[in-house]
Image (cartoon, helix red, strand yellow):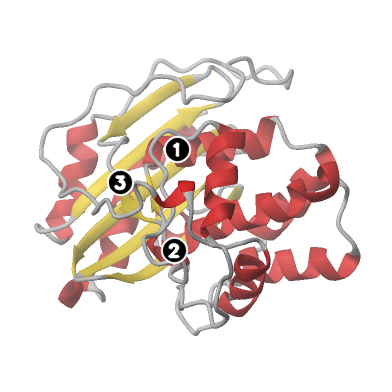
Amino acid sequence: MWILAAATLVGATGAGLASAAVTPSVDGSVAASPAPTPHGVATTPRPRAVTPVRPQTTDAAAVQGAMRAVLASAGVGFEVFDRTTSTVLTSHLADQRFAAMSQVKLLIALDVLARDNQKVPDDATKQELHQLLAHSDDRVANRFWTAGGGPAIVTRMVSRLGLSGTRPPGDPGEWGDTLITAQDMVTVYRYIADRLPEPDRNVILTALADTSKIAVDGFDQYFGIPDGIPHTCRAAKQGWGTSGSQAVMNSTGLVGSDWRYVVIVLARAPVNSYSTLPAVVTAGARALANLVSPASS
């Protein structure tokens, strides 16, 4: 969930807002070809235990169909990336922009950790980051957003990670209206898993692996990956809310042993479908489960 930042931002506008007024595109119906390797991340993963390479794929149209069987009007985008083989296993409209909702909290956390040349934060900051990510605390997000210059956080992370479709919000106080793509979210998780110094990586992954069922605002955040891909390791960040006339639900994270898979499922629909969208995202995650579940590893 997300709420408006309470404090007025000083100097929050600027170069990063040049294209912030872009409206999220309406989802199409043609499945995308497998996406290229995301920009800005090394293509060779760090050495790890040998895992068999699986030729299995999931038809993107089948995943899309499972989601739209729940809500025909849903616009959806998704991607699954295998970090072991550096392969996109399935993808659909992965370059389409969706409102970020609480996915922007990952960028906020990375920006906090990037300060002082990646110096390990003090215990109080670690606890705030845990609250921000595990419990999706908007009050913590507001404090970090304001202190970091609001949209400038997004601009910095776009540059640092090499994100191609992510844009700051048009209104500096509405951090949930930051625009993301499924492909860029894959890049974010690959950056966390493969490029962050280990102490910082542990701060983020420990929080994401400790995601509470009920968020600070009372919302059940176990839709999508938690309910759709159970009985496996996960480090997930959920997002929910409204952006203009649209309801938006996002489920993203690392799944499997050694965080092998990046799973991104994004969905939007008219605001009167708000209560149905969690089931849409869960249906998508469930349809992707055969790619990342222990039984298929």
**Quarter of the view holding residue 164:** top left
Disc nearer the start of the sequence (2/3): 3
**Nearer to me, 10 or 226:** 10
Q: Using residue 24 as the reference point, say whether residue 210 is left or right of it.
A: right
The residue under the point 39% across, 19% down is: 36
The answer to whether 275 is drawn above or below residue 66 in the figure is below
Q: Position of residue 285 (x, y in %)?
A: 36, 49
Could you classify mark 1 by the number of other residues whose Cα lies within 10 Å: few (under 14), some (14-19), or many (20 or more)? Answer: many
Is 284 or 205 nearer to us in this picture?
Answer: 205
Give above or below for 271 relative to 199.
below
Residue 99 image-quadrant placement: bottom left
- C-alpha gap between disc 2 and disc 3: 15 Å
For the residue labelled by badge 1, is the local secondary structure a helix, a strand or a loop?
Answer: helix
Tell me the quarter of the image containing the N terminus. bottom left
Secondary structure under tag 3 reads: loop
Query: Residue 251: percent from the left, percent from the top?
Result: 43, 55
Q: Is residue 286 visible?
A: yes
Which residue lies at the image location 55% right of the left edge and 40% below the top edge? 188
Q: Nearer the viewer, mark 1 or mark 2?
A: 1
Residue that carries the numbered disc 2 in the rendered image:
239
Distance of mark 1 from mark 2, alpha carbons? 15 Å
Horizontal relation, residue 155 to residue 76: left or right:
right
Residue for badge 3: 97
- Whole-Å distance between the Cαs marked 3 and 1? 10 Å
Q: Mark 3 or mark 1: which comes first in sequence?
A: 3
Q: Position of residue 286 (x, y in %)?
A: 35, 49
Q: Quick check: can you spot residue 224?
A: no
Please tell me whether residue 246 is drawn above or below residue 79 in the rendered image.
below
Contact between labelled residues 2 and 1, with CB atoms less than 8 Å apart: no
Q: Position of residue 267 (x, y in %)?
A: 28, 55
Residue type of the residue flagged with mark 1: Asp
